[in-house]
Image (cartoon, helix red, strand yellow):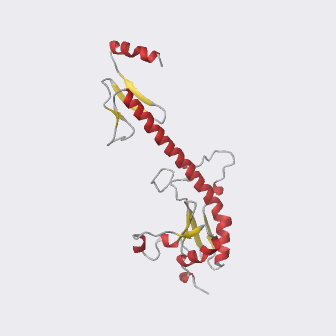
């Protein structure tokens, strides 16, 4: 029997792959990846072919798996905030929603690496993939909301800037979120996907000029 030290996650990943079916493949490696160590995490990972997520195998006894156990974790492959890697479940799922259970989104398991590749694959399908799929779907939904918000925000800001003769800030603090070049008396305060808040300080005569337009709103 192989010792714990002799059982390598890279080997287990490759042994499990055929038992997961045709939807899975070895994680693709770039030329830079190929220069990394033999234990580089991508060498221990399997990628789904039609979904963005992947699963990564860790060596026995690491990642808190306990003696004789191997930790297998899933990654959604989608970041709800773009490139930021670290985020919590609460950022993508409302914890106060009816029926919410954090365990439904579990995306990691511990297994015995000596139980056989076919049984490990069954554990992955039964215990890991349902939670990983739910977690990934929640990430995709949240990311779509973020993209839609950004698009609506840019459109709103651009329209307001054009209407008052200003321009959307392109660099520096609040780039893409503020308006510069506004007429005297106008000051930018805040913007969202549907509105822009400005503070306006004008003389009585200036207010009288724009009064009819305000009344027509």
- Left or right: residue 75 versus residue 167 is right
* Residue 65 seen: no
Vertical order, 188 against 5 (above or below): above
Q: Nearer the viewer, residue 179 or 202?
A: 179
At a point 53% along the width and 44% down the height, the residue shown is: 145
At a point 63% along the width and 80% down the height, the residue shown is: 114
Q: Nearer the viewer, residue 57 or 60?
A: 57
- Left or right: residue 94 versus residue 41 is right
- Left or right: residue 106 versus residue 157 is right
Q: Nearer the viewer, residue 134 or 113?
A: 134
Residue 183 drawn at (x, y percent) = 31, 25
Which corner quadrant of the image does residue 74 belong to? bottom right
Vertical order, 197 against 111 (above or below): above
Residue 100 drawn at (x, y percent) = 66, 49
- Left or right: residue 198 versus residue 18 is left
At a point 43% along the width and 31% down the height, the residue shown is: 196
At a point 62% along the width and 87% down the height, the residue shown is: 1
Which corner quadrant of the image does residue 9 belong to? bottom right
Residue 158 drawn at (x, y percent) = 40, 34
Residue 127 drawn at (x, y percent) = 66, 65
* Residue 204 seen: yes
Vertical order, 125 against 190 (above or below): below
């Amino acid at each position: 029997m192989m010792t714990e030290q002799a059982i390598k996650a890279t080997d287990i990943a490759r042994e499990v792959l055929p038992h997961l079916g045709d939807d899975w493949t070895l994680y693709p490696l770039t030329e830079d990846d190929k220069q990394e160590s033999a234990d580089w995490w991508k060498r221990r990972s399997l990628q789904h072919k039609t979904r963005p997520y992947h699963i990564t195998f860790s060596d026995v006894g690491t990642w808190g798996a306990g003696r004789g156990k191997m930790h297998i974790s899933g990654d959604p492959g989608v970041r709800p905030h773009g490139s930021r890697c670290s985020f919590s479940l609460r950022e993508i799922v409302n914890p106060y929603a009816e029926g919410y259970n954090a365990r439904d989104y579990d995306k990691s398991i511990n297994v015995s690496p000596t139980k056989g590749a076919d049984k490990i694959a069954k554990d992955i399908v039964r215990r890991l993939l349902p939670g990983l799929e739910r977690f990934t779907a929640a990430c995709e939904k949240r990311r779509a909301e973020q993209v839609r918000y950004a698009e609506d925000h840019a459109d709103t800001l651009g329209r307001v800037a054009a209407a008052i003769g200003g321009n959307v800030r392109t660099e520096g603090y609040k780039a893409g979120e503020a308006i510069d070049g506004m007429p005297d008396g106008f000051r930018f305060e805040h913007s969202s996907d549907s509105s822009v808040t400005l503070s306006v300080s004008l003389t009585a005569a200036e207010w009288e000029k724009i009064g009819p337009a305000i009344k027509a709103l």
